Image: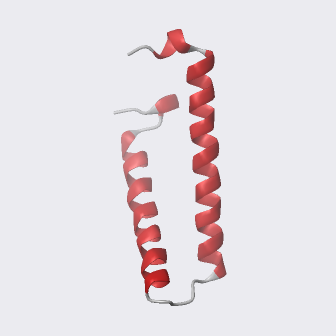
Amino acid sequence: MKYHFGVPGSIIWISHIIIGLLLSYVGYNIVFNKKINNNIGLIVLVIGVLAAIYHIHIWYDKSSNPEEHIH
C-alpha cells in the first residue's frame, strides 16, 4: 500500500509505532512526575511541527487540485 506522494505503507506504520512508543514514554514520565530529558522534549516538538507541516501540505495539495484526488 502506498500513501500520499508514494510513501510506502510500512514506513508510515513503523513511524506511527515509534512515535506511539515515544509518546507513551513521555506520558508515563508526566503521570509519575518524573523529569523528562530536554532532548526528548525537543524530539516531540520537532515531530509535532513536521506532522503539522506535512498534513497542511496534503490539505493544500488536495484543495488546490481536487480533480486529481477523486477516489
Which quadrant holds the C terminus?
top left
Q: Where does residue 17 sit, x and y in percent of width and height?
A: 38, 59
Decide: is 1 above or below 70: below
Q: Where does residue 43 sit, x and y in percent of width and height?
A: 61, 67
Which quadrant holds the N terminus?
top left
Residue sitting at 64 percent across and 43 percent down? 53
Q: Residue furthest top?
A: 67
Q: Residue furthest left?
A: 1
Query: Looking at the image, which is closer to me, 15 or 47?
Result: 47
Residue sitting at 41 percent across and 63 percent down? 20
Residue sitting at 37 percent across and 46 percent down? 10
User: Is 66 displayed left or right of 24 in the figure?
Assistant: right
- Chosen colour scheme: secondary structure
Q: In which quarter of the image is residue 63?
A: top right
Decide: is 44 above or below 59: below
Query: Looking at the image, which is closer to me, 35 or 6?
Result: 35
Residue sitting at 59 percent across and 56 percent down? 48
Decide: is 16 above or below 61: below
Q: Where does residue 64 sit, x and y in percent of width and height?
A: 63, 17
Query: Looking at the image, which is closer to me, 31 or 58?
Result: 31
Q: Quadrant of residue 24?
A: bottom left
Decide: is 56 above or below 48: above
Give the total number of marks visible in the rendering: 0
